[in-house]
Image: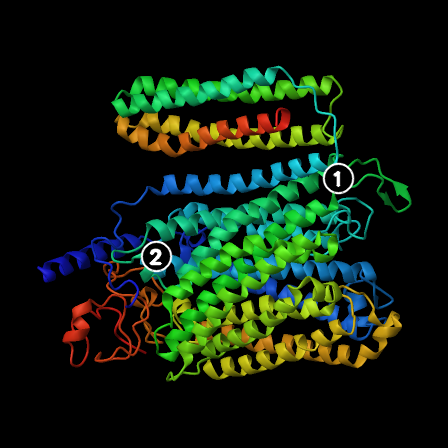
Amino acid sequence: MEAAIRSERAARGRERASRSHHEPSFVRKYIFSTDHKVIGIQYLLTSLFMALVGGSMAMLVRLQLAWPGKAWPVLGAVFPDAFRDGVMRPDFYYALVTMHGTIMVFFVLTTILSGGFGNYLIPLQIGAGDMAFPVLNMVSYWLVPPAIIVLMAAFFVEGGAPGSGWTAYAPLSAVEGSAPGSGLGQTLWLISLALLMVSFLMGSLNYITTVLNLRARGMAMLRLPLTVWALFVAAILSLLSFPVLTAAAVMLLFDRHFGTSFFLPEGLVVGGRALEVSGGDPLLWQHLFWFLGHPEVYIIIVPAMGIVSEVLATHARKPVFGYRFMVGSLMAIAFLSFLVWGHHMFTSGMHPLLGTAFMTTTLIIAVPSAVKTFNWLATLWRARIRFTSAMLFAIGFVSLFVTGGLTGMVLGSPAANTYFHDTYFVVAHFHLVMGSAALFGVFAGIYHWFPKMFGRLMNEGLGRLHFWLTFVGVYATFFPMHFLGAAGMMRRVFSPQVYGFLQQLEPLNVAITASALGLGLAQFLFVYNFGYSLFRGARAGRNPWQATTLEWYAPSPPPHGNWDEAPPVVHRWPYDYSLPGAGEDFVPQTAPEPAVVLAGGAPAGGAAGGGEGA
Amino acid sequence: MKPGAAGSRASAGGAEGRLPSGRIVVWLLLAAVTMMFVAFTSSYVIHRAQVPSVAVPLPGLLWLNTLLLLASSATLEWGSAEFRRGSAAPGRRALVATLALGLGFVAGQVAAWTRLAAAGVFLHSSPHSSFFYLLTGVHGLHLLGGVVALAVVLSRARAASEAGQALRAVGPAATYWHFMGGLWVYLFALLFWL
């Protein structure tokens, strides 16, 4: 009976494989592809490219902060409009700060985690052949390059790129002529984000429906890998929070171009000119922006948490500690993230009672965050850890998440926030907890799934060197920024040296810039490793990490349609590592329950396809 | 106990017993649309509380438009009922009626705009007029999305060999359409009565 079912399944698999052998054209296969794996890799590469762009902007920002007023003849020759006699112009500096933030938050971290890993991993890890809506998925990716082009075009229009920051606070962003780059540049910024929001909406619809509807036989929700849970929760967050920013962006466009005054207060004077506006409210923009803005940071960090949980368990050879609590804490964090936006606005003019309410919800987020941290540490406790590059970055994530998270508690208190608001203390906080931690999640994910994506292993020696340089570089760059902030250095300040009380910080600023440049250079190790391994890396085989989840049941790289044999059937939860009595220290999700118990040596029958190791 | 260990193979996973993807996606989409209108209308409510503004004179045409839209929901339900009963031709006629009534609503909204503009009430005239044009405009665009969806459903219903197939196509589009009707009643009441 069992044999008959299996032969039937194999026949269906062969049929699928032969169907997938119908070769699409190059354009349909690699460019306008509806294959979730190709789309995921497209998102991944696009985001990595944008990380280089956004990172380079950060380097220019750091040059200015360490040596304000210094002439850079070479840079002046490359960007003649941005540098006057080789000295950086203030409006270019503000454009850099704005675009660095926008690119890193929206076009790197959101696109790579939800778009890259979401697309690549969700169908594979739930045992599906593709997404629920492959064409919608393709359109979702192909909205991103136009959004990038529109965004970058802002640098080349009259007035230059916007300088109002990634938060685009009104009225700076709402009135042309109120700030450098507040002309066409700001409009392009809004259009670019609008395109991206449509893309994210399509992505979220797809991820949620796929997880709900296309799970393989036996894949109950509580058997989903934590990566899928995290991407699922992030998609729900994205679905519910981005429409609020869409509404705000529409209103801002109306204020800019159709004469309304949603965000413009009565009697506003810009550049000595009284505006004909009536009765708007700049605070309204802040409320709407942060109602998206705070969930947005969780849209970024939650998938990174999922990746880290997965990588920690696999390379520690232990089950994830407290799986249900991991799922529950993800949901708790997601829910609470909608109730804390006011903590960005303590100093904007808020009733103290309301401030206290926002403080309470903010501090409560520490509880599910601590649950997750405890569970990660408990997963590592007494484990036979394999210190692969992926594992090092996952452990680095936990470290950065704790360091950055603790200052979140400080900033969440209205009293302390009044002092630290808009200083480098805030810059240190979010670069550690959101920027760097999420980036470490990305690196952990790339080192872990590169073999599946491209069929080859990345170089481990280079990977470990990359980790140590990045880990030290991140701490050396961002940790001292706490001291800058405590000393009163303002966020977004163009030249700290014009203020007497900030002049003593010059050596620290120079040291931070040196670390930042080193950190930036270290990333080229990764670029080299990525490119080299793509062509010369060792062949990976199906399951190089001896992992349990379904993607390792497929060939590396998986064919169109994902499964060369029958689609997988799931018999167990995703973290059966070091099961007592089992022959090997991992049991794939495809292995039937009794097969392990019966086996004295290798699990009989159940390990089909998943068993062969590196 | 290990999570998921208890899930029997029959109850865990498997395509049977799940909602069709189209139905899930329409509810997700409506959740997103809801959040967007929550943002718009809460902005309106706060704005109104802070700055007293002279309301736009209510165009009488809006009553007719409201009737058209509610009638279109009724004809859509009538069409679904016909498909459910297995009679395809009357079902398709009801869909055509729904489309016509929906387009009538959009035309009526545009006519209300032009009348207001002729009376000197423009987008930037007052906070209330700004919100009036913004909310009716965004709602109208979403309704046009529904018109496109219904047109696609109608073409599928024509091609469908049996009424059951047509019914499956109608379901998600009908949910969206009724939601747009309810949304309009909410916006109308909020702008002029609440």
SS of the residue under disc 1: loop
A13, above or below A455, in the image = above
Residue that lies at the very extreme toward the left in this rendered image: A1
Horizontal side, residue B96 vs residue B131: left or right: left
Horizontal side, residue A245 vs residue A17: left or right: right
Residue that lies at the very extreme toward the right in this rendered image: A272
| Lower position in the chain sequence, tag 2 or tag 1 | 1
Residue to which mark 1 is pinned: A280
Between label 2 and label 1, give the one nearer the viewer: 1
**Res. A560 mark:** 2
Report the residue at 80% width, 78% height from top.
A505
Q: A368 or B73, which lies in front?
A: A368
Q: Three-letter amino acid code at disc 2?
A: His
- Give the quarter of the figure containing the N terminus of chain B: bottom left
Q: Position of residue A166 (x, y in %)?
A: 68, 56
Residue that lies at the very extreme toward the front in this rendered image: A353
Q: Three-letter amino acid code at disc 1?
A: Gly
Q: A29 or B12, which lies in front?
A: B12
Q: Position of residue A1 (x, y in %)?
A: 8, 59
Q: Are marks 2 and 1 on the same chain?
A: yes
Q: Which of the 4 image quadrants contains residue B74? A: top left
Horizontal side, residue A543 vs residue A43: left or right: left
Asked if residue B162 shows in the view, the reply is: yes
Q: A107 or B111, which lies in front?
A: B111
Mark 2 Cα shell of 10 Å, populated few (<14), some (14-19), many (≥20): many
Q: CA distance from mark 2 to mark 1?
A: 53 Å
Horizontal side, residue A173 vs residue A243: left or right: right
- Give the quarter of the figure containing the C terminus of chain B: top right
Label 2 resides on the chain identified as: A
Label 1 resides on the chain identified as: A
SS of the residue under disc 2: loop
Circles 2 and 1, Cβ within 8 Å, touching? The answer is no
